[in-house]
Structure formats: C-alpha cells, structure tokens
Amino acid sequence: MKRIVVFASGSGTNAENIIKFFNHTKTAKVTQVLCNNEHAKVFNRCKNLKTKCLHFTKNDFITTDVVLDILKKEADFIILAGFLWKIPEKIIAAFPNKIINIHPALLPKYGGKGMYGMNVHRAVKENKEAETGITIHFVNANYDEGAIIFQAKTALLEEDTAETIAEKIHVLEQRYFPRIIEDTILGVNE
C-alpha cells in the first residue's frame, strides 16, 4: 500500500475528499496532511477524520530539511490540495513524478503565480470563456507547468458568476481528483 502526504493551505475540502476516498481502498492511505497556515480549517477536518495534520513554516519548507525529512519517512506520493506555495526543487528532486497538483482551470490557460481560487474564476468570467474545468498535473519547478495527467471540462453560461464557476469547479474536483490520483498511483495514466 502506497503512502500519501497531502499539502493544504485552506479549508481542506479536497484533502477531506482524498482522505475519505483512500480510507476505502487498498491502493494507498493518507499518512498525514501538512499545512502552512496554522488557522486553516483543514486542521478541524483532519481531526474529525483522525488524520494527523502538522503545521510547518516557510523556514521548515525552504531553508531546512524539516519537511523533506517528514516526506522521506511518510510519503510515496505527495498531493497538493489547495496548497499555495511553490514546491522547493529539493522536494521535486526527491519525488520525481510523485507530486500531483490540481488546478481550477484548463491549463495552460489561467496558470502561473497568483492564479489560484477566485483569482482564476474571476479571470475566466472576465474573459467570457465558454468553458472551464480542472487540470490534474505533475509538479515541476514552475507553477502549473508540469505534465498534464487529466482534464475535465464544464460548460459556462453567460449568467455564471465567479462564485457559480467556483461551484462547478468544486463538483469536478470532488468527482475526479481522488480517482485520478488512484489511477496515477496504479500506473493507469501512463
């Protein structure tokens, strides 16, 4: 059974969905969640799911090997679920093609630094896109530029707002993210 460590920065709905999904498979198990925001709601979700959730600082992540050492002990795969910091190259090098992220748009559109959450949905709306979606991809040294594993689309209506776009994206994330992680671990997407 493979071990997954999830990185999260916020409310933790994707982290919760992943934990619940893998609690019912023999493919992998979430060993813990690592969070860079000590006030994030993900801590409560993890507590309710009896999953270890640790806070770490930028120093732990970038300057020292505190986070890398945890990952080497606890992870075969790393999943970014609403995690907002760029992954240091030392972690990418230690886990090649083992770090998976989800992005709330159809990359390469609306990717890059600062393009997350409502920033993405507002840009999609402002540009009057006919569709948007999610992209699940491997992480490399650049924001949102790793190899694409999977995309799912949803049509947009003229009356959609950034908030309704966010709701449509959330439905896609909840439906596909855990399953695509499992398929990737099993080698189905190769």
Image (cartoon, rainbow, N blue to C red):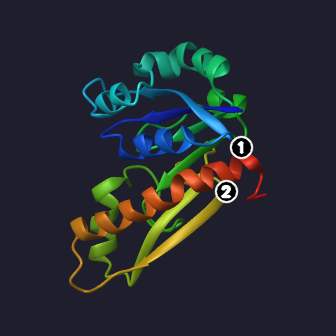
Label 2 SS? loop
Location of residue 184 in the rendering, given as x and y in whole percent from the top left corner: 69, 51
Considering only vertical position in the picture, is 65 above or below 108? above
Considering only vertical position in the picture, is 126 above or below 139? below
Disc sitting over residue 190 in the figure: none
- The answer to whether one can see residue 114 in this image is yes
Label 1 SS? loop
**Would you name the residue on which mark 1 appears?**
97
Location of residue 27 in the rendering, given as x and y in whole percent from the top left corner: 68, 41
Is residue 9 or residue 43 the one in the foreground?
A: 43
Q: Left or right: 35 with respect to 164? A: right
Callout 2, which amino acid? Ala
Q: State which quarter of the image contains the C terminus.
A: bottom right
How many residues crowd around disc 1 within 10 Å: few (fewer than 14), some, or many (20 or more)?
Answer: some
Residue sitting at x 47%, y 41%: 20
How many residues crowd around disc 2 within 10 Å: few (fewer than 14), some, or many (20 or more)?
Answer: few
State the count of labels: 2
